[in-house]
Image (cartoon, rainbow, N blue to C red):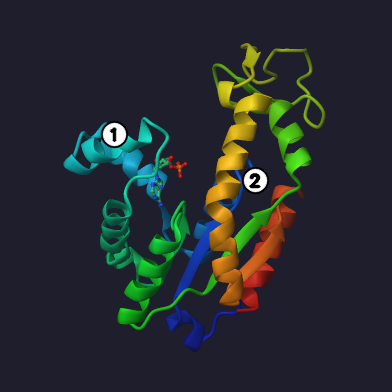
């Protein structure tokens, strides 16, 4: 665990978490934010909230999101800028889904530098593509309670039936091999330049993502402790 002394308490923990779809980013975000008491800032979640509340931002963002496109940089950057000024970000933050372009990464750096803040580290969850694909294509979820199973590693007791509530298990449409490949290719195309960007700055920590949840979290904690 990260050592806490009076100096460190003052030090912000400003993290970016990156990783391919299905690498466990959501689960690890939750664990990190709870452990270090920092807010989870997901631009995707912020856009979805704005869309459901039908705000001006939501109406603008939905035009792009519906088409599977990135929301323009100026809209996204100003949203993040405002969020990072909120009082709960004083001790740090975990960014998830931002930056997604080099322009966004440059703006983030400028913003932080102008306030004498800086990024602590960029965590990249890494996973072998074939293993990730089989992990996802073998996933089945309960239509009723949302419980998740795996046909190889976490089989239900009765085929196709949820152990918890006895409702039917299905494969999510975006977990099928073809649509997962599209998501994965899109991630690689857009994220690789950022991986190199942060690697050159010496901020990147690569963590194997396919170990069990607690092992991945322990590796993340070690990286944070070594900052
Ligand atoms: P996510 O849940 O992170 O996959 O985000 C859902 C959608 O929100 C994306 O497909 C984009 O359309 C939009 N979005 C989220 N984050 C960003 C970002 N940093 N830059 C531009 N668009 C974004």
What residue is pinned by disc 2? Answer: 23
Q: Is residue 226 left or right of residue 121?
A: right
Q: Residue at x 70, y 60 (%)?
A: 207
**Residue 165: image location, x then y, percent:** 62, 16
Q: Determine the secondary structure under disc 2.
A: loop
Residue occupying the far left of the picture: 56
Q: Is residue 217 left or right of residue 5?
A: right
Name the front one of labels 1 and 2. 1
Can you say whether 133 is above or below 103 in the image? above
Can you say whether 133 is above or below 190 in the image? above
Q: Determine the secondary structure under disc 1.
A: helix
Q: Residue at x 70, y 56 (%)?
A: 216
**Residue 185: image location, x then y, percent:** 61, 41
What residue is pinned by disc 1? Answer: 63
Quadrant of the image for the N terminus? bottom right
Quadrant of the image for the C terminus? bottom right
Q: Is residue 157 visible?
A: yes
Q: CA distance from mark 1 to mark 2?
A: 28 Å
Ligand 1 sits in which quadrant? top left
């Amino acid at each position: 665990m990260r050592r806490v002394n009076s100096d460190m308490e003052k030090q912000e923990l400003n993290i970016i978490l990156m990783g391919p779809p299905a690498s466990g980013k959501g689960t690890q975000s939750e664990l990190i934010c709870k452990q270090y008491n920092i807010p989870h800032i997901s631009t995707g979640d912020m856009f979805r909230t704005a869309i459901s509340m039908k705000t001006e931002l939501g109406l603008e963002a939905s035009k792009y999101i519906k088409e599977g496109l990135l929301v323009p940089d100026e809209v996204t950057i100003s949203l993040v800028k405002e969020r990072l000024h909120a009082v709960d970000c004083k001790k740090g933050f975990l960014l998830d889904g931002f930056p997604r372009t080099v322009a966004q990464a440059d703006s983030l750096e400028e913003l932080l530098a102008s306030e004498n803040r800086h990024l602590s580290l960029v965590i990249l969850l890494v996973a072998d593509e074939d293993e990730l694909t089989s992990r996802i294509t073998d996933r089945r979820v309960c239509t009723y309670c949302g419980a998740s199973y795996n046909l190889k590693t976490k089989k239900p007791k009765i085929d196709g039936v949820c152990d918890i509530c006895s409702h039917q298990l299905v494969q999510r449409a975006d977990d099928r091999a073809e649509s997962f490949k599209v998501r994965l290719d899109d991630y690689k195309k857009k994220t690789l330049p950022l991986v190199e960007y942060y690697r050159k700055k010496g901020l990147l920590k690569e963590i194997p993502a396919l170990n069990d949840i607690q092992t991945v979290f322990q590796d993340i904690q070690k990286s944070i402790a070594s900052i």
